[in-house]
Amino acid sequence: MASARCAGLARGICFQPGTFSNHFSLRPFLCLIPCITHTAFLPYSHNGAPKAFATFQKRLFHNLSKEKFLKICQAQVLTRDGAAQPTEVTAEAVEKYEAVIGIETHVQLGTATKAFCSCHSQYGSEANANVCPVCMGLPGALPVLNEKVVEYAVKLGLGLHSDISLRSKFDRKQYFYPDLPKGYQISQFDIPICRGGYVEVDLPVEFGGGHRRFGITRVHMEEDAGKLVHAGGDGLSGSLYSQVDLNRAGVPLLEVVSEPDMRNGLEAAEYAAELQRIVRYLGISNGNMQEGSLRCDVNVSVRPKGQDKFGTKVEIKNMNSFSAMQRAIEYEVSRQVCLHEEGFESKIVQETRLWEEGSQRTITMRSKEGLADYRFFPEPDLPEVSITQAYVDSLLEDLPELPNTKRRRYESLGLIMQDVLVLANDSDVAAFLDAVLDKGADLKLTANWIMGDIAAYLKSEKTSISDVKLTPATLAELISLIKDGTISGKIGKEILPELLRKGGSVKEVVEAKGLSQISDPALIEGIIKQVLSSNPKQVEQYRGGKTKLQGFFVGQVMKATGGRVNPTVMNEILLRKLTA
Ligand SMILES: [Zn+2]
């Protein structure tokens, strides 16, 4: 193989990659592991992987006859063919099956420092800028637990209605990967910090709505691994060499494991969206999927309806939005249904598949390790995690109102579910709404301003409600000044962008611009008299029966007052004068 370019080879600290046909998943990495333990930035070669990949796929079906093998390939091709597949293969077939979906979510915590050392944990630093002997796994370095990690774990557990373990411990999860220099990950195995619980979700109205409760199995604390950067290609395949960035190694994570309670892609996506809302409301993570702060691994299996036994589950990774997650699940369900329908259900293997956004399909990544492969054992470098009930109670006391409670409250105040979902979606927007309501403003009017003109402004300016200068008190003032007739709704809309941009009080802006509404009947009557006397012909026509000319007079009065006249008072006087 002409591709042995690993710099470790020259130094005699690396294995020759050799042929890949036997140990596809392990062999290329053997090349890097020894290198990485010596120096953290060595390139290695993995040409030849695509060929091994094909061999690997073939071996999955090695005991099939050629005819059956071709048939299964066709089935896979059908399900890979984007939009065409459900109509051809699964339109009725899907109805005969039930999908069972469980989700493992990794939430990256927004602590200032890493889980077991004092390195900064912020996203986007220069590669390997935030590393130290502990997170690089150098021999002799000892981890010390960051207590914020425990605090955030308990907060999330409380938000998910879990039982909090007052005593839990850390364990080592052993596996080799080039971005894991220690050769194991510090995680929690048999005694996680939180057990049980649930998430409540309101499905979008446009998809039929409905309320669901999905169970939580456990939440445990662990550390993140580093990140491989593949140079010269979009991924591992096709790249020239790979580099490792250990900034993320040791960043604290909470893994949230759900019960297999979801039945379709929409439910799964909504579960994940709710989890994102909860961590954002709690302020423990930015929950940003694009930055990898919220990563979902979805387990999907399919079984004939009425069957108790679960089908073989397939794990899907690599989805960086909720809609991608929904599409990946829908694709995977049809793929599995297709295999069932073709009589190949035994060929659904326990494996990890990647979602390919470009081709809108899932592809085989690797066969899944079993639990026994990880050789869990108690972490000897860290003491047991021991917390008191009083500590848990104090965190419970300070817990903010969470999304589901907020939605129920908005609903009980009389908002329709469509508006409730919009307003409670973002904790900052919901907090803004609540603050305006605290100033005594009307709920419906406030909701309309936030979802209408303010949302449009935020969208066009690509900003967020926490970054605008408009305060809740000012919006409350605006609403009340419109209500009492000091300014018209039209003027309110006109001055809103300035309030959002520069802030200040509504009264000041209105006075400075001379925009206050004219409501004084004597003043309005004077203006109307003037308008009528300068348009005698139209007055005559109106009185002769051409009553639609009223609009003309309204326009003239508006023009004369710069649109500031109170329409109700004006209409009343105008009608009286015209018919006099
Ligand atoms: Zn460190």
Image (spheres, grey):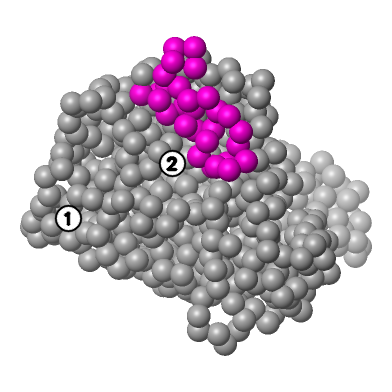
Q: In the rendered image, which quarter contains the C terminus? A: bottom right
Residue 517: x percent and y percent? 56, 44
Say which quarter of the image contains residue 189: bottom left
Give residue 221's position: percent from left, percent from top: 28, 49
Callout 1: helix, strand or loop? strand
Q: Is residue 108 above or below residue 417?
A: above
User: Does 23 lie within the magenta span?
Assistant: yes
Give the position of the N terminus as an image quadrant: top right
Element assignment for label 2: loop
* Residue found 20% across the figure and 49% down from its top: 378
- The residue pinned by badge 2 equals 293
x and y, in percent, of residue 416 in the image: 53, 69
Q: Is residue 320 left or right of residue 467?
A: right
Q: Which residues are magenta?
A: 9-37
Closer to the camera, 255 or 445?
255
Mark 2 neighbour class, 10 Å CA radius: few under 14, some 14 to 19, many 20 or more: many
Please name the residue shown 77% across and 62% down the image. Answer: 69
Q: Is residue 502 visible?
A: no
- Is residue 141 rendered to the left or right of residue 449? left
Q: Callout 1, which amino acid? A: Ser
Look at the image and say whether residue 42 sits in the magenta stretch: no
| Quarter of the view holding residue 136 | top left
**Mark sitting earlier along the chain (1/2):** 1
Q: Which residue has dot 1 on it?
A: 168
